Structures are given as structure tokens and as C-alpha cells.
Amino acid sequence: MNLILEEGQELKKVLIVLDHKVLMNENNTHPDFIGPVYEHHPSVSEKFWIEFHLSFLKFFIRDFFFYDLLKWKLTGKWHPSFKGKISEVNPSESVVYNNIQNFSIRTKAERQIEQQPDLYYSRIKTEMKKLEPVTHELKLSTRQVNLMKEMKLIFLEHNTEFNIIFGPYWNSDQLDRSTISMISECFGADHVYDFSGGNHWNTDVHNWYESSHYRPTVGASILKSIQEEGYSNQSK
């Protein structure tokens, strides 16, 4: 947020979507979240530019990923050697980014779900098998708590409308109440909304691309429930 302000931009409305993985990966150093997808741009991290680009280069050449990528691009066919590198399910997924609203849509997946839902979900049947729900117990660091309090002060200083949202999990996982309570103390309970645990968003498989990502329609529904129905984390 400081970077946004330094660039001369305004903070009129802010929506922060969190889950246990984001909170676990403090300083981007958690061993379970290592890789290009978790790299932060040097503008918002403490890394040098060369270190940032070398990290991507390292993963590009590791395990001959570049060779498998080239093979896939040339043949258009998935090969067992791609396992763990290139997804067998929808490897040619098309993604459209909305830079104004800051979200992405998987256009190919959306088209398949709308036109051939049974075929789409039959391919990921194993992944979508329900597991026993887990309560993720976290211990926020002093640094994390102080950063949240600092964010709240920035919001107040700039008259920013803000909300903190914990989205649903396919397996109905939830965050422990002590973590939610602590975050509510930092931002104010009227700004924190917890949609983890069992709810109607994780009872219908058609709300999900796969077990880790719900569709934009779920996000829109969540925002509507906040704006129109007055959903509160205190009601859970």
C-alpha cells in the first residue's frame, strides 16, 4: 500500500482476500511455498532485481522444464514426463486478466463448464473427492500483527473503504477462531468476514475450477452477501 501511495495513487476502496497459506508464508520463506508463483516483485520485496530474475531462471532450467515446455508447445500433447511440471488437466488453459477489476477468468474452463460440465468434472473427479475438514490453527507473528495495525491506520488516514475476507475452502476447512479474533482486533470486527467452514459455496462442485480455486461467480456472490445481506463473521 505504501508503494501505491508513493506512486501517487489513491486508496479509495481496498479488498484483501486471505487464507491460511498467505498468513503462513511470512516473508515468502515458508518451505511449502517456494517457486516462481510465490515470488514477489522487487518493488514490494527486499530482493534485488538480479536475484528476482535469477530465481525464475533457476526454475525454468531445473529438471529440464524448458525441454518439456518446448516439447509440449511443439506437439500440443501431454506426456508423462510433464508430471509435476505441466498440468495434465487443461494444459492449454486460456486466462483473461481484467486489469481494472484485478481478477482473472479461465475462459476455456468457463466455456467447458457451461457447455460440458459432466465431462469437465469427470476429468478431476479424484481431485474433487471430499476430504475431512481441517481447522487451520495459526500463530500470527508480532510483525504480522503490527503490519495489520499499520494498514488500518493507513486506511483511516486516507478515508479508505476496506474489507478483509477469508474465502471458502472446497473441503470446508476453516481457520481457528483465535486467529480470526486477532485479525478482527487489528482491523475492526465490522471489516472482517470469514467464509471458511461449511457453506453453500462448497457444496456445489460447479462453483469450482478445481479443489483450490473457486470461480469468479463465487467471489461476486460473496461480495453481494456482504453488501446486501450484512453477513458478519460474528454469526458463525
Image: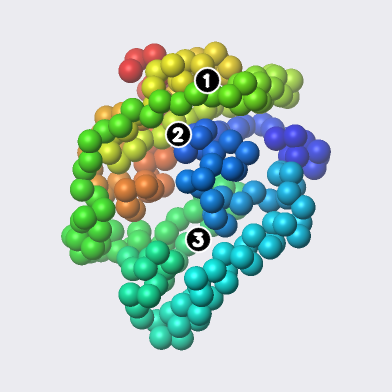
What residue is pinned by disc 1? Answer: 183
Q: Residue 191 in the image: x percent, y percent?
A: 52, 20
- Dot 2 or dot 1: first in sequence order is 2
Q: Quick check: 120 above or below 159?
A: below
Which quadrant would residue 161 be assigned to in this image? top right
What residue is pinned by disc 2? Answer: 20
Q: Report whether residue 121 is seen.
A: no
- Graded by Cα atoms within 10 Å as few (under 14), some (14 to 19) or many (20 or more), the crowding at tag 3 reads few
The three-letter amino acid code for the residue at tag 3 is Val
- Dot 2 or dot 3: first in sequence order is 2
Q: Report whether residue 105 is seen.
A: yes
What residue is pinned by disc 3? Answer: 96
Query: Gap between marks 2 and 1, in whole Å?
Result: 12 Å
Q: Residue at x 51, y 35 (%)?
A: 24
Tell me if label 1 and label 3 are in contact, CB under 8 Å: no
Q: Residue 218 in the image: x percent, y percent?
A: 37, 41
Query: Which secondary structure lies at badge 3?
Result: strand
Q: Residue at x 68, y 63 (%)?
A: 54
Q: Quadrant of the C terminus?
A: top left
Count of marks placed on residues: 3
Q: Residue at x 39, y 72 (%)?
A: 82
Query: Gap between marks 2 and 3, in whole Å?
Result: 26 Å
Which quadrant would residue 56 be assigned to in this image? bottom right
Which of 187/64 is in front? 64
Q: Residue 182 in the image: x percent, y percent?
A: 51, 16
- Graded by Cα atoms within 10 Å as few (under 14), some (14 to 19) or many (20 or more), the crowding at tag 1 reads many
